[in-house]
Image: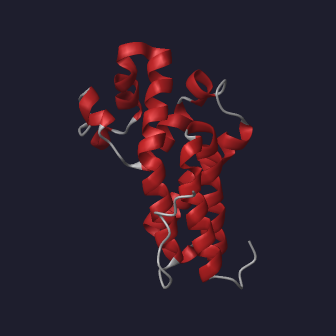
Amino acid sequence: MASYSLMLPLGNTPTLYLNAGLSHMAPLLRDYVIVGLFSRFGAEWWQRCHEVNPEPVREKYTSEAKVRGNSDPVFWIKVMELFWEECFDDRLGPAERSAVTSLRHYRNHLSHDSSKLSPHDIYQALLAIRLVLRKIAPSSVLEVDSLLLGLRVQHPACTF
């Protein structure tokens, strides 16, 4: 039986659907990226993440445990983009790469000016999350499907 634990009650704003999808994806993406980095760089994987961050961010991630504990999906999306050719190109295709890039774009709008995101944009972002999760954690896709369904129910007039 399908699990609909991420289905939000009616009356929520569309951005809550995207927040729920990103929150659901974050630990799964983190684990996938860590495995990819470890398989390429070995025990120094976390230092590679540490090196690619700007100086203020670097101060927060001075150990493997601190990097591993980061649950911000944008951090893992950026790391994934930066090491795509070295670690993920042979595991994921161009569709997933495009989805990862679009997720950074949608997440930036969500953080800085969520008024720019329409229900259609939120739906497209959830589809991108679904596409990535279908490859990295297939059993978690039903949770995103419930968010997509909830958004469609709440905004039936939108063309998705």
Locate residue 11, reporting x and y percent: 48, 85
**Residue 157 left/right relative to 104:** right
| Quadrant containing the N terminus in the rendered view | bottom right
Question: Measured along the vertical axis of the image, is residue 132 above or below residue 6?
Answer: above
Locate residue 83, reporting x and y percent: 54, 29
**Residue 1 left/right relative to 31:** right
Question: Measured along the vertical axis of the image, is residue 111 above or below residue 63?
Answer: below
Q: Which residue lies at the image location 56% right of the left edge and 60% below the top edge? A: 106
- What colour-coding does the image apply? secondary structure
Q: Hey, which residue is sitting farthest right in the picture?
A: 159
Q: Which residue lies at the image location 35% right of the left edge and 46% below the top edge? A: 71
Question: Measured along the vertical axis of the image, is residue 19 above or below residue 36?
Answer: below
Q: Hey, which residue is sitting farthest top in the picture?
A: 42
Locate residue 140, reporting x and y percent: 53, 48
**Which image quarter: residue 134?**
top right
Residue 87 visible in the snapshot: yes
The residue closer to the viewer here, 115 or 66, is 66
Q: Which residue lies at the image location 48% right of the left edge and 56% below the top edge? A: 22
Question: Measured along the vertical axis of the image, is residue 9 above or below residue 61?
Answer: below
Residue 105 visible in the snapshot: no
Locate residue 105, reporting x and y percent: 57, 56
| Quadrant containing the C terminus in the rendered view | bottom right
Q: Hey, which residue is sitting farthest front in the picture?
A: 1
Q: Could you tell me how many numbered marks the image carries?
A: 0
**Residue 112 left/right relative to 57:** right
Q: Which residue lies at the image location 35% right of the left edge and 26% below the top edge? A: 46
